Image (spheres, rainbow, N blue to C red):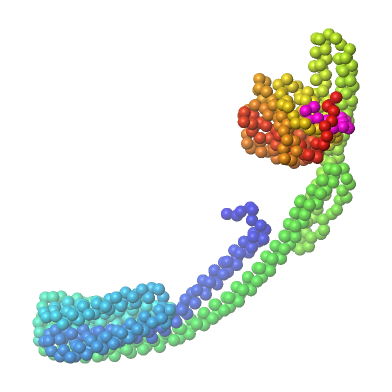
């Protein structure tokens, strides 16, 4: 599934990768077919020279050993011939084992053939067991012959797994020739059994059943293999099938099956065996002559399909890579322009407009490349111009609103200052306690109104009108801040260190602490107290305002601390956080670090870390 976060270069590459991969797979499929055929040709050559020919020689020697062993079982004579044949069999098997297990053969054949050879040699190791049966007294003839049969059968099972020429017609003919070889092996078994019984001998029930099984299997395999051969390869066997020796053998075979008694003349068996061996060699030679032209044709296919296909594949990959690189470069240039516009030019423009500076409009450089890329570049330039106009209008609106705020706040501040002066004069003249208490409450209310008017001035980016020329003690600053809070009676100011603040920072820090104290009184139960304390810290003076309210969730607390750590941009839509904006702006103006954290009593502790640069060095008179 497509991931929207992937880069454009990846998307282009993925888009071009589909046809390229399809082409590679198509070429790989064609090359694999032809290369596989080529590898089969190489393997066939190795199999013929190093597996098939040595194994066929070993099969012939084993067939001869089985025949001589069967004759030896009949009268226990001519033991020297059996011993000599065993030596020849051992030499043939040793040569076959040596060539088949050599490194050259193992590297050339496939894994399946290597497993088949390993299994074959494990079965060939049963030959001493068969020979022990021959040497034992009273050995059963059919059991001995069956032991040799099992060993030779493992050879033919290996032939079935050998890779043949990758031509279907030749493959079918080769399978049929292999079938004729199996028919020849069945004939050799009949020959061994008849030799064991001897001329004029009578078959036992076991021998008769074994001979019947051999004869039926030979006729079936011979008939099926012969039916699949074409005219040329079947010709020698058609001649053999009409020969007197073959008819004589069939007659001998039928009489033996019918009467269980062998004739006195067994020469038809030997005559047929000689002819079958000659016919098998002739047919194999005819089949081998067909392999060379088929191999040459396959090699030509390999050269054409592999070579030309590889050239076209490389050309396609090169062209696709150049197209992808060019398109990716154009899109990369467009991306860089958009990033430059979004992250550098527009923020710089907005910042200049926010500061009230002139910001001349500069167009984007023209893009090259395809028409679509140029159109996108022009669209970006239009977006830039629209954004510039919107930023300029917003800056003008912001300045206008700020000026309105400042103008209204200055007027209110002037009126409130006059009202405070008049209230102070009335307080000095009044002697009635009740009236004087009302004047004090009115004075406190006017002080709070003055602080709210100063909030508008601070949010507009201007400085309040109040100010002190001389340093003021910290304890007086804290008391003045508490006096500007409605529920000042709930606030307790703990003894503060002997320190003073510079006159230029006094008004702003009074306002900052007042906002924190008022926030603590508003968001805590009315029966609880708010504690204000000041203590020395390594980086300056820490003022802590602690309430015992319900606290703030961790996520919201982290967001409030983030806003307090940055100089915020006042958002008219976020009117619920005016106090937060005021505190953050005052803190950034004097380098004060304000942090909110959970209180051990369940509420919130607001800590304002006042830097040493704001502290005065000597003790000064108290706040008037």
Up the image or down, 169 lies above or below 523; here it is below
**In this image, 483 relative to 229: left or right?**
right
- Left/right placement of residue 353 relative to residue 206 reads right
Q: Residue at x 84, y 46 (%)?
A: 352
Residue drawn at the location 82% of the way across and 23% of the way down: 447
Instruction: Check the image and name the residue furthest to the top.
Output: 432
> Where in the figure is residue 595, as x and y percent of width and height?
70, 36
Q: Quadrant of residue 580?
A: top right
Expressed as whole percent of the image width and height from the top left, the position of residue 134 reads 16, 82
One can see residue 190 in this view: no
Q: Quadrant of the N terminus?
A: bottom right
Give 539 or 261, whichever is nearer the viewer: 539
Which range is magenta?
465-476
538 is higher (above) or lower (below) than 193: above
Q: Is residue 112 left or right of residue 421?
A: left
* Count of numbered tags: 0
Q: Is residue 23 magenta?
A: no
Tell me what residue is drawn at x 62 percent, y 29 percent: 602
Left or right, 152 with reference to 508: left
Residue at the image position 40 percent from the left and 88 percent from the top: 289
Where does residue 493 sit, x and y in percent of width and height?
A: 73, 25
Of residues 166 and 385, the one drawn nearer to the viewer in this rendering: 385
Q: Quadrant of residue 137?
A: bottom left
Picture quarter containing residue 229?
bottom left
Above or below — where is 141 with respect to 557?
A: below
Quadrant placement of the C terminus? top right
102 shown above or below 439? below
Q: Position of residue 86 (x, y in %)?
A: 23, 86
Q: Report whether residue 79 is seen.
A: yes
């Amino acid at each position: 599934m497509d991931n929207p976060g992937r880069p454009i270069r990846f998307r282009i590459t993925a888009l071009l990768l589909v046809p390229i991969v399809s082409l590679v797979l198509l070429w790989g499929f064609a090359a694999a077919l032809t290369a596989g055929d080529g590898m089969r040709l190489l393997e066939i050559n190795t199999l013929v020279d190093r597996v098939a020919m040595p194994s066929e020689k070993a099969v012939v020697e084993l067939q001869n050993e089985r025949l001589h062993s069967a004759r030896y079982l009949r009268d226990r004579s001519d033991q020297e011939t059996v011993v000599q044949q065993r030596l020849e069999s051992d030499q043939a098997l040793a040569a076959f084992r040596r060539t088949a297990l050599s490194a050259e053969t193992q590297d050339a054949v496939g894994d399946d053939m290597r497993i088949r050879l390993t299994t074959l040699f494990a079965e060939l190791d049963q030959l001493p067991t068969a020979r022990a049966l021959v040497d034992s007294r009273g050995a059963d003839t059919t059991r001995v012959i069956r032991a040799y049969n099992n060993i030779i059968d493992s050879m033919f099972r290996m032939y079935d797994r050998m890779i043949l020429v990758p031509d279907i017609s030749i493959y079918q003919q080769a399978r049929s020739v292999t079938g004729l070889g199996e028919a020849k092996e069945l004939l050799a078994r009949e020959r061994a059994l008849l030799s064991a019984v001897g001329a004029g001998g009578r078959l036992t029930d076991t021998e008769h059943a074994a001979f019947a099984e051999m004869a039926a299997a030979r006729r079936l395999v011979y008939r099926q293999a012969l039916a699949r051969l074409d005219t040329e390869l079947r010709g020698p066997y058609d001649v053999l099938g009409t020969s007197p020796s073959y008819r004589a053998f069939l007659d001998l075979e039928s009489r033996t099956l019918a009467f269980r008694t062998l004739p006195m003349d067994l020469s038809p068996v030997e005559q047929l065996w000689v002819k079958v061996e000659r016919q098998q060699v002739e047919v194999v030679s005819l089949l081998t002559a067909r392999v060379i032209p088929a191999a040459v044709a396959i090699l030509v296919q390999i050269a054409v399909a592999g070579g030309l296909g590889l050239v076209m594949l490389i050309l396609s990959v090169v062209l696709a890579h150049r197209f992808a690189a060019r398109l990716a470069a154009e899109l990369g240039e467009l991306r860089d322009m958009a990033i430059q516009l979004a992250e550098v030019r527009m923020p710089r423009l907005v910042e200049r407009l926010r500061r009230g500076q002139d910001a001349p409009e500069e167009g984007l450089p023209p893009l090259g490349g395809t028409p679509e890329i140029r159109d996108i570049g022009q669209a970006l330039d239009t977006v830039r111009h629209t954004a510039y106009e919107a930023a300029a209008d917003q800056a003008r609106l912001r300045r206008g609103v700020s000026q309105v705020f400042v103008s209204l706040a200055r007027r209110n501040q002037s009126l409130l200052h006059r009202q405070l002066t008049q209230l102070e004069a009335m307080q000095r003249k009044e002697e009635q306690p009740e009236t004087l208490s009302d004047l004090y409450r009115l004075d406190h209310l006017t002080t709070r109104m003055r602080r709210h008017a100063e909030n508008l001035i601070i949010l507009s980016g201007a400085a309040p009108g109040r100010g002190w020329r001389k340093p003021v003690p910290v304890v007086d600053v804290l008391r003045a801040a508490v006096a500007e809070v409605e529920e000042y009676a709930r606030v307790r100011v703990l003894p503060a260190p002997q320190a003073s603040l510079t006159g230029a920072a006094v008004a702003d820090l009074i306002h900052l602490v007042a906002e924190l104290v008022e926030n603590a009184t508003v968001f805590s139960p009315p029966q609880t107290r708010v504690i204000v304390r000041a203590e020395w810290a390594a980086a300056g003076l820490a003022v802590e305002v602690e309430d015992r309210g319900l606290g703030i969730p961790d996520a919201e607390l982290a967001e409030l601390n983030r806003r307090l750590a940055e100089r915020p941009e006042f958002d008219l839509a976020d009117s619920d956080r005016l106090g937060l904006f005021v505190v953050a702006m005052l803190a950034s103006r004097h380098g004060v670090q304000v942090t909110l954290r959970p209180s051990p009593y369940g509420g919130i502790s607001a800590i304002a870390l006042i830097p040493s640069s704001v502290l005065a060095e000597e003790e000064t008179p108290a706040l008037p």
